[in-house]
Structure formats: structure tokens, C-alpha cells
Amino acid sequence: MQQIAIVGAGGFGREVKWLIDDINLLHPTWEVIGFFDDDFPSNQKIDSKLHLGSLQQLNQWQQVLAVVVAIGNSAIKRQIVQQITNKNIYFPVLQHPRAIVGKQQVSIGEGSIICANAIVTTDIIIGNHVALGVASTVGHDCRIHDFVSVMPSANISGNVTIGEAAYIGTGVNIIQQQNIGAEAIIGAGAVVVTSIPPKCTAVGVPAKPIKFH
Ligand SMILES: CC(C)(COP(=O)(O)OP(=O)(O)OC[C@H]1O[C@@H](n2cnc3c(N)ncnc32)[C@H](O)[C@@H]1OP(=O)(O)O)[C@@H](O)C(=O)NCCC(=O)NCCS
């Protein structure tokens, strides 16, 4: 068994713990030693014994340790990953046993999380620290850059490119061949039929930018 810790003790962190438990049911692989979180939630739903400390303590960890950064917000996720400087840390890909990932020309970068019932078809490049939420789908020839978060039940059609640290809300549908700019936020339920510029929030059907950040 390899030791693994989860960064982020919020809701997604607990879901990732469940994902790891499900991997272990099939192939005993990981010993979850606990969570690192600078703001340990006050409404603790995890046992405080499992709170291992802050990022500072993670950076001082002396043993080799697998780490998964389980933060939904793409921008915060990127910030946190960039703060992890400890050479003892490595970032495995975590794929739920009931996710379907094509064997044909699919690459998935370190630290990425593929949740239950996600489907990734063929000829797809997924960067580092990408999260594909429960029941999300990624079609042929997509390119999903580092730190993107795709929320549950979003559907990304073929030949879509999603820029670094973009956030795709729950239930979003993106039609084929569109580009989503880096750091764009696509609101829940949006239907994207034209490319979306970087650093904006776009909502609605069809999705249109409502603000830039
Ligand atoms: C799009 C989103 C990021 C906007 O958040 P925000 O920047 O805080 O913006 P606000 O809530 O102030 O909303 C701004 C306007 O957009 C509207 N709006 C917000 N989200 C919307 C959405 N998903 N679809 C359509 N309109 C939306 C608001 O009603 C508001 O309209 P108004 O100016 O006419 O009052 C957020 O509402 C959202 O959809 N987040 C995704 C949530 C999600 O997928 N969670 C998954 C968790 S697993």
C-alpha cells in the first residue's frame, strides 16, 4: 500500500476519499493517511485526527507521499499546487473504477482526478491536476489544459480545447470545435455554442460572457 494524503478537507476532498476507497475495494493500493488544509472546516465532517496540518506542514513532510489536490475552484487549485514544493511529494492520477477512459491515444497528466461515471473517449490530452466530475463526458480530440475543473454532468463535445485553469460548471454542454479561454468560468447549465474568451464568466443558453476578471 502506498501512502496518500488529500489536500482540501471540503466536500470534494471527502468525495475523493470515497473515490480512493472504491479503488481500494477492487485493488488495494492506497493508505489514506489524512487531509491537509489551511482552513480546516469548522463544520468538520472528517475526524479531526485525520487533519494532518497546513500546506506548510505538507512541505515539511519527510517521507515519500502521494498527494491529490481535491479543490474544485480551478484558480485556487493552481495556487495550492504551485505552493507545494516538497520533493517527497508526487501526484498520481486517480481514476474511479467505474470511470470509462479510452485506451486509444488518451493521456492524463499527473494529479488529475477522473470521478465515477466520467467518460473520456479517444484521442484526448488531459493536462495536470484536471478534475473530471461525476458523470462528465469528454469527446474525441479534446485538449484539456492544466488545472481545469469540470463539474458533474458537463458534456464536452469533440475537438474542444479548454484553456488552463478554466472552470466548467455542472450540467454545461459545449458543442464541438469550440475554445474555452484560460481561466474562463462557465456557469452551471450553460450551453456553449461559440468560443469563450479567457478570464470571463459566461452563462446562459447560448453562453455569453457577463463579466471579465
Ligand atoms: C456562473 C457563476 C460562477 C456566477 O457566480 P458569480 O460570479 O458569483 O455571479 P452572480 O451569482 O453574482 O451572478 C451574476 C448574474 O448571473 C446570473 N447567473 C449566475 N449563475 C448563472 C447560471 N449558471 N446561469 C444563468 N445565469 C446565472 C445571476 O442570476 C446574476 O444575474 P443578475 O445580474 O441578472 O442578477 C455561478 O452562478 C455558477 O453557475 N457556478 C457554477 C456552480 C457549479 O457548477 N457548481 C458545481 C459544484 S459540484
Image (spheres, grey):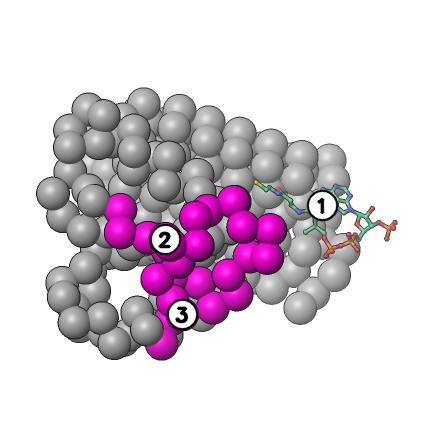
Task: Report the residue at 24% width, 31% height from top.
Answer: 23
Is 142 on the left-hand or right-hand side of 26? right
Residue beneath disc 3: 54
How crowded pointer 3 is (Cα within 10 Å; few <14, some 14-19, many 20+) is rated as some
- Name the amino acid type tagged 1: Val
Q: Secondary structure at mark 1?
A: strand
How crowded pointer 1 is (Cα within 10 Å; few <14, some 14-19, many 20+) is rated as many
Residue 52 within the magenta-colored segment of the rendering: yes
- Name the amino acid type tagged 2: Leu
Residue beneath disc 1: 203
Which quadrant holds residue 197?
A: bottom right
Residue 83 at least partly seen:
yes
Q: Nearer the viewer, residue 85 or 121?
A: 85
- Residue 166 picture location, percent across and down: 51, 55
- Label 1 or label 3, whichever lies nearer to me, is 3
- Residue 148 picture location, percent across and down: 45, 52
- Residue 212 picture location, percent across and down: 69, 65
Is 67 on the left-hand or right-hand side of 73? left
Is 136 on the left-hand or right-hand side of 108? right
- Residue 158 picture location, percent across and down: 42, 33
Q: Nearer the viewer, residue 188 or 50?
A: 50
Task: Report the residue at 37% width, 35% height from top.
Answer: 18
- Identify the mark nearer the N-term, 2 or 1: 2
Cα distance, mark 2 to mark 1?
38 Å
For the record, the magenta segment spans 32-56
- Name the amino acid type tagged 3: Ser
Task: Report the residue at 13% width, 63% height from top.
Answer: 64
Residue beneath disc 2: 50
